[in-house]
Amino acid sequence: MFDTVKTLFRGASARQEASLRDHYALDLIDQKIRETEAALSGAKTTLAGQIQRLRTEEMQLEALNKRIADLTKRTGAAIKAGNETLALDAANAIAQLENEQAVRRQTTTRLKTHIEKLRLSVEKGQRRLLDLKQGAMSARAARNEQRANTRLSKVSGRAPAQEAQALIDEVLAKDSPSDLAEIYEEIEAGISHSDIETRLGVAGFGDKTKISGADVLARFKS
């Protein structure tokens, strides 16, 4: 029993959630697009930061290369001049710079790889965002069409236009009270034979019980 109630409750909750999602579908789509835009903006900021760091590393690596080249030249001159002490100090400096050079080369290589992946991700996200915006426009147009069809169905559908037509038909189908009264009088006269004299007079058997317009016109002519 308890499991059945839980199942019914979950079913009702799912239907309610589906109804809410359908009702606020356009708002939810806009919110998800805003979230996508925010994520894409963050990715672009990260990409810009990585590119800036790569450029800094490349500038420092270039400066290292120039310094190493300059010290190498100076060290060779010191060796030729027989200044071993100064040449050894220069060689130690070159070794330290070359170690730093190796680290910065690794850093720039890693940054380039990361930047390329991030750039592809940003481009993919940008295309996805455009697709979402176009989809949102299509969804909004479809929803407007659905609402227009709903309003149109109220005019051309079963309600309330059909109800109005049914009422009109009812009113037109009703008999006129004056017509009914005349019919009742005719029936009553036929039953009681109260109109027999009138019918005999009209047929020419005796005087008419009622003067007609033709009688008045004949009198004027005579």
Image (tube, helix red, strand yellow):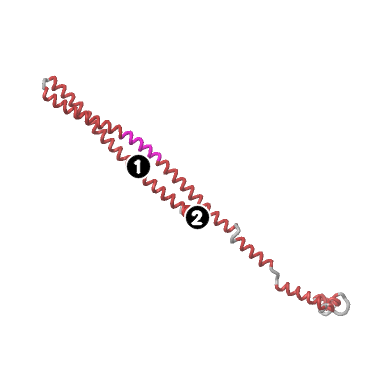
Secondary structure mostly seen in magenta is helix
**Viewed as shown, does residue 214 lie left or right of 179?**
right
Of residue 108 and residue 8, the one placed in the foreground of this image is 8
Amino acid type of the residue tagged 2 in the rendering: Thr
Quick check: 124 above or below 210?
above
Number of numbered markers: 2
**Viewed as shown, does residue 14 lie left or right of 214?**
left
Amino acid type of the residue tagged 1 in the rendering: Ala
Residue 141, image x and y in percent?
50, 50
Quarter of the picture containing the C terminus is bottom right
Q: Residue at x 33, y 36 (%)?
A: 115
Of residue 7 and residue 106, the one placed in the foreground of this image is 7
Q: Residue at x 86, y 80 (%)?
A: 207
Circle 1 or circle 2, nearest the eye? 2
Q: Residue at x 44, y 52 (%)?
A: 27
Kindly tell me whether residue 39 is visible in this rendering. Answer: yes
Quick check: 77 above or below 56?
above
Q: Secondary structure at mark 1?
A: helix
Q: Residue furthest front?
A: 1
Query: In the rendered structure, does residue 116 fall within the stretch colored magenta?
Result: yes
Quick check: 84 above or below 154?
above
Residue 203, image x and y in percent?
87, 74
Of residue 101 and residue 51, the one placed in the foreground of this image is 101
Q: How far apart in space, not on screen, are marks 1 and 2 (Cα)? A: 48 Å
Q: Which mark is residue 4?
A: 2
Q: Which mark is residue 43?
A: 1
Q: Which residues are magenta?
A: 111-124
Q: Secondary structure at mark 2?
A: helix
